[in-house]
Image (cartoon, rainbow, N blue to C red):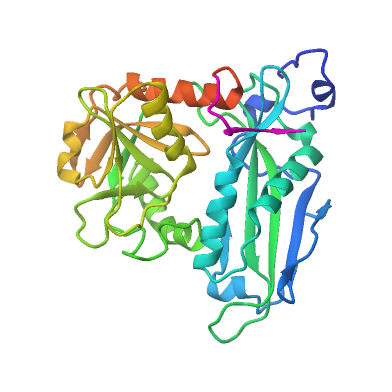
Amino acid sequence: MLKYRKGTDTDMAKKNLDWANIGFAYHVADKRYVSNFKDGKWDDGVITEDAKVVLSEDAGVLHYAQECFEGLKAYETEDGKIVTFRPDLNAQRMVDSAKRLEMPAFPEDRFIKAVEEVVAANKDWVPPYGSGATLYIRPVMFATGNVIGVKPADEYQFRIFVTPVGPYFKGGAKPITVKISDFDRAAPHGTGNIKAGLNYAMSLHAIVTAHEEGFAENVYLDAESRTYIEETGGANIIFVTKDGGLVVPKSHTDSILPSITRRSIVYVAKEILGLNVEERPVKLSEVPEFVEMGLCGTAAVISPVGKINDHGKEIVFKDGCEEMGPVIKKLYDTLTGIQMGTVEAPEGWIHEIK
């Protein structure tokens, strides 16, 4: 069991958990935030202890998948502060997702205030600095109103709950092996660029199949030509060139989710590390020319990829096959340092919870 530093109020109040071994799973925290949309407006919202959601059997979310969500984290820094990372971008992305699904947008300023309130109400659940664990924050919005015909619902719920999660990499970040998928993640000009549950439902059969075949993830190609790299089921992709530059796949048809982690990595690479960065369409045929590959997202920040299996033919990344490659490691260390407060953050990136 981890020992906590003495001398701060937050340390004294921590839940008695084995933080390093709690896994990436749901733990029922004490409080959550709930606001309901009815009669054309959002109510004031409340912090509640009730973790249950009660729905009518004809709630829109159950039939026509009107649902979107976000994911971000809260951290304890070395000096004992509790912070979140760029929550304004999550608020903005959730507005974009809601609009695309004909749902009422939850105001961005209220989103950030709700994050502040729910994290502050669960400060005892924020893992201690140095444990490797973090507090995962899940905002979600879904249709609660009654529908039978295919149309948007009239009522919705916005909810934020939190759960402590253990270190994503236990024993170090070991490169994974992924496969080129025969399935499509998102249609051209579809919903691939929003964070909707329906996109993830589409990937479930593919990821179960990949795991059964011994692979960690799927790499999806563009559905139109099946020649360009897009993303995996749960993360964006980055590549490193032989001369140490960064290449980030971009979609012709706007079908890649705009990852906040990826956006932050691009800034770190350009402005802090001085790397050459290209954001452009990337053909599968050019992937063997790269020396490192990573999957980026909230949970792991960057997961190193050692190999891609393309229908029996292996693409091996020579600088990242056995361990995290040098460029990706530098990106990972810099970004996690910013999040944890050991590296100076660009203005506006770190949002303190009072």
- Residue for point 24% across, 28% down: 317
Stretch in magenta: 344-354
- Residue for point 57% across, 58% down: 95
Quadrant into which the C terminus falls: top right
Q: Main secondary structure of the magenta part?
A: loop
> Per the image, is 138 magenta?
no
Quadrant into which the N terminus falls: top right
Q: Is residue 341 above or below residue 151?
A: above
Q: Is residue 52 above or below residue 19?
A: below
Q: Nearer the viewer, residue 249 or 231?
A: 249
Q: Nearer the viewer, residue 11 or 91?
A: 91
Say whether residue 133 is left or right of residue 187: right
Q: Nearer the viewer, residue 180 or 34?
A: 34
- Residue for point 39% across, 34% down: 266
Residue 12: where, in percent of width, then height?
Answer: 84, 22
Q: Nearer the viewer, residue 318 or 77?
A: 77
